[in-house]
């Protein structure tokens, strides 16, 4: 993994009006970077704003405030049609629901080739057909599947079709929005291993959004933990698991079951109470340990530094 920034998120906000005077702050001022070739995991419970973050990055939503810098250019700045087409080719998304994200009236070949057609990537029908068949084989399907419809496939197969569609325009960055949450556990590992393999072969960069911390650790280089629209902790995957600092991260990790009945009977689960926080000042994102950032007040920062300075 290089240390060259591909994506910079600066104070991103995504607020939605729900009434005349009511606003939901789905994303409320988050900042992080993603480097070329890495997988950045974004985790948190349902409703915390992680999927909204992904959709704001790719311009499915216009950001309320903040900046999204991709390859040195502002994603939400004014762009003409050609600039938008170039951006849409560089950044693709794999959606959560493999049933709703594929058009049931289109054959698999046309679903996968839709992006290629829009961007004019294949000069003739023969080249288009060959590319679709190559993509199907890349994601572990057969070229004979090209003439079938989505309803003829299982959930795991449909998600592979979604991955092939994302790869069709040769993107450099893919947002995987909970791509395994709708799949059986036995299929989840297959899809994640496929994503890791594709990353290695094609030099892809991922934003991997999920609520399953154990799976996120398996695929991610760094992890950001999100709670009610804000990132509360960010660190390397191993460091975050070995040394969680924010109480919310500790509560998420304590909820992960282990295949050990003796341990499970005696295990203590940690419950996070947001009311236990210091409210004397607005919390800031601070570096408690090298490259380990936590959202905290000055008082909490001093406590965390003291408590975690000797942890290895």
Image (spheres, rainbow, N blue to C red):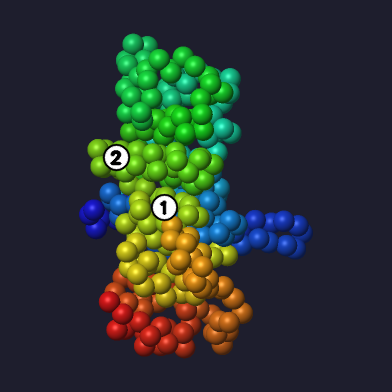
Q: CA distance from mark 2 to mark 1?
A: 15 Å
Q: Nearer the viewer, mark 2 or mark 1?
A: 1
Q: Which residue is mark 2?
A: 197
Image coords of residue 103 (percent x, y): 56, 26
State the residue lying farthest toward the right. Answer: 20
Residue drawn at the location 27% of the way across and 77% of the way down: 312
Image coords of residue 156 (percent x, y): 47, 34
Most foreground residue, 214 or 237: 214
Image coords of residue 215 (percent x, y): 41, 52
Most foreground residue, 77 or 92: 92
Q: Which residue is mark 1?
A: 215
Q: 248 above or below 277?
A: above
Determine the secondary structure under disc 1.
helix
- Please indicate, yes or no, whether residue 239 appears anywhere in the rendered image: yes
Pointer 1: residues within 10 angstroms few (<14), some, or many (20+)? some
Residue drawn at the location 36% of the way across and 30% of the way down: 139
State the residue lying farthest toward the front. Answer: 262
Determine the secondary structure under disc 2.
helix
Pointer 2: residues within 10 angstroms few (<14), some, or many (20+)? some
Q: 109 above or below 36?
A: above
In this image, 183 relative to 236: left or right?
right
As drawn, the label of residue 206 is none
Image coords of residue 201 (percent x, y): 25, 38
- Location of residue 164 by image quarter: top left
């Amino acid at each position: 993994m290089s240390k060259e920034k591909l994506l910079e998120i600066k104070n991103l906000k995504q607020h939605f009006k729900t009434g005349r005077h009511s606003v939901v702050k789905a994303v409320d001022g988050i900042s992080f970077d993603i480097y070329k070739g890495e997988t950045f995991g974004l985790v948190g419970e349902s409703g915390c704003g992680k999927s909204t973050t992904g959709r704001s990055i790719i311009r499915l939503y216009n950001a309320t405030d903040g900046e999204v810098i991709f390859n040195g250019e502002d994603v939400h700045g004014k762009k003409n049609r050609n600039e938008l087409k170039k951006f849409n080719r560089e950044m693709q998304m794999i959606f959560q629901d493999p049933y709703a994200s594929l058009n049931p009236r289109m054959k698999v070949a046309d679903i996968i080739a839709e992006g290629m057609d829009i961007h004019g990537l294949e000069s003739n029908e023969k080249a288009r057909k060959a590319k679709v068949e190559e993509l199907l084989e890349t994601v572990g399907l057969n070229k004979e599947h090209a003439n079938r419809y989505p309803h003829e496939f299982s959930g795991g197969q449909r998600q592979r079709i979604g991955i092939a569609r994302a790869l069709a325009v040769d993107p450099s960055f893919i947002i995987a929005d909970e791509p395994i949450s709708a799949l059986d556990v036995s299929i989840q590992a297959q899809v994640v291993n496929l994503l890791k393999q594709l990353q290695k072969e094609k030099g892809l960069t991922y934003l991997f959004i999920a609520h399953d911390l154990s799976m996120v650790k398996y695929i991610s280089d760094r992890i950001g933990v999100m709670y009610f629209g804000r990132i509360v902790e960010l660190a390397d995957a191993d460091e975050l698991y070995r040394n969680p600092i924010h109480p919310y991260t500790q509560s998420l990790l304590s909820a992960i079951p282990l295949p050990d009945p003796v341990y499970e009977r005696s295990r203590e689960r940690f419950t996070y109470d947001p009311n236990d926080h210091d409210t004397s000042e607005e919390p800031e994102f601070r570096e408690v340990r090298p490259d380990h950032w936590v959202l905290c007040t000055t008082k909490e920062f001093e406590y965390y530094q003291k408590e975690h300075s000797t942890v290895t």
